[in-house]
Amino acid sequence: MISNRVSTMQASPIRKLVPFADAAKKRGTYVYHLNIGQPDINTPPEIINAIRNFSASIIPYGYSQGEPYLREAICEYFTHYNLKVAPEQIVVTNGGSEAISFAFSIVADPGQEIIAFEPYYTNYNSYASTNDLKIVPVTTKAENGFALPPIDEIESRITHRTRAILLCSPNNPTGTVYTREEMKRVVDLALKHKLYIISDEVYREFIYDGAGYTSMLSFPEAEERVIVVDSISKRYSACGARVGYLVCKNKEVIGGAMKLAQARLCPPMVEQVGAAAGFRLSFDYFKTVQQEYKRRRDIMYKELKKIPGVVLEMPQGAFYMVVKLPIADSEDFARWLLESFEYEKQTVMVAPAQGFYSTTGMGTDEVRMAYVLECDKLEKAMKVFGEALKVYPGRI
């Protein structure tokens, strides 16, 4: 027997179909990967060169809270958003994943609850499971672009066990960017009920069409209750470097994060050298990257809207779309694409959306698609996807 904590953990909807994709490739079928947010844009050479030029004769243990030069570089980066953060308000983590897990551990005890807006990043469930917490979902809808629901609907989920509200903007998996007004309502609700706000802001550079970025750090009235989690993974196409961090102006929260950081010793030393180089890049870098992802978004959206029965609104951020399809079981559909379908020796891999929901029965007619392929490949992938929906035997 293994622990109930682990045996009841959810398998990743993004990764669990990998064996079927591998089998398709062995059969000679080309697979377009739309299932995972793995950017194909090159990691900035400044990051690669900083790592390559690491010249120490030994790789030592570092500071548990992260190297001072990296925390200072992060503070400098935030000034571009007119946000003032001090190095002592930052704890560097092993990827954004650890930052989220730390935040969960700090704000809640076993059996307590965190409110999240579904669909949400599926690993929130994993971090809740490993901390013996419960995610309480508030459902958002494809039909209105996954905007936040009315505040009274959110408030109805608050109980004596609720410890925090978790939100992600720009959003993974929907691409939704919450307005400042939406976020202010969450702030007011959290203050009313003395809750923490955990704000996942990993995709802040990926916002399109003039939609504004609002950080939870920009609400001074809530600074004692806001924990921002972040990562270099998507920002700099450095997913494998595993450098993230959390920011909080509450000394007690940072003290708790330090205890957790000390327990796991320190974040990776060499990758922090690269991360610091990334944070000191000119912001012109993001303009080029953002333009490229906007082109990709526009291609995917245009082609999907041509398909009868598809429901989606134009997402304004990140590089994902949750797409409602005329199917009954998106997990069956995703597996069928890899096991039983090909068009001109090609197929596509998508992520079934059930895994991004807590509510039973939600997401069965939805998939998450990531526009992380270059434009010509994305156009081909959309052609293959459209042909698949024409012949899928589970179409309704």
Image (spheres, helix red, strand yellow):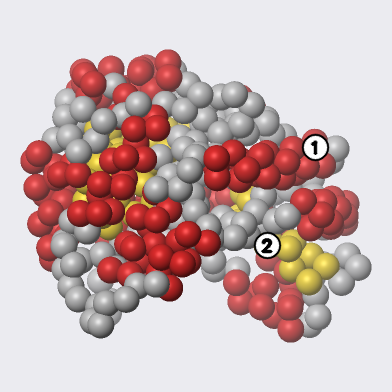
| Left or right side of 195 for 141 | right
Relative to 224, residue 269 above or below = below
Quarter holding the C terminus is top right
Tell me which residue sits at (36%, 40%) in the image: 77
Q: CA distance from mark 2 to mark 1?
A: 19 Å
Image quadrant where residue 223 sits:
top left
Task: Give the crowd class for mark 1: few <14, some 14-19, many >=20 residues within 10 Å.
Answer: few
Residue type highlighted by circle 1:
Lys
| Left or right side of 396 for 78 | left
Relative to 384, residue 112 above or below = above
Quarter holding the N terminus is bottom left
- The circle drawn on residue 186 is none
Task: Give the crowd class for mark 2: few <14, some 14-19, many >=20 residues within 10 Å.
Answer: many
Front-lying residue, 109 or 96: 96
Tell me which residue sits at (28%, 53%) in the image: 70
Front-lying residue, 310 or 57: 57
Kind of element beneath mark 1: helix
Relative to 79, residue 318 above or below = below
Please give the count of numbered marks on the rendered protein: 2
Q: Is residue 287 visible?
A: yes
Residue 20, percent from left and from top: 66, 74
Q: Are marks 2 and 1 in contact (CB under 8 Å)?
A: no
Tell me which residue sits at (45%, 61%) in the image: 47
Residue 52, percent from left and from top: 43, 73
Kind of element beneath mark 2: strand
Residue type highlighted by circle 2:
His
The residue singled out by tag 2 in the image is 33
- The circle drawn on residue 302 is 1
Tell me which residue sits at (39%, 49%) in the image: 279
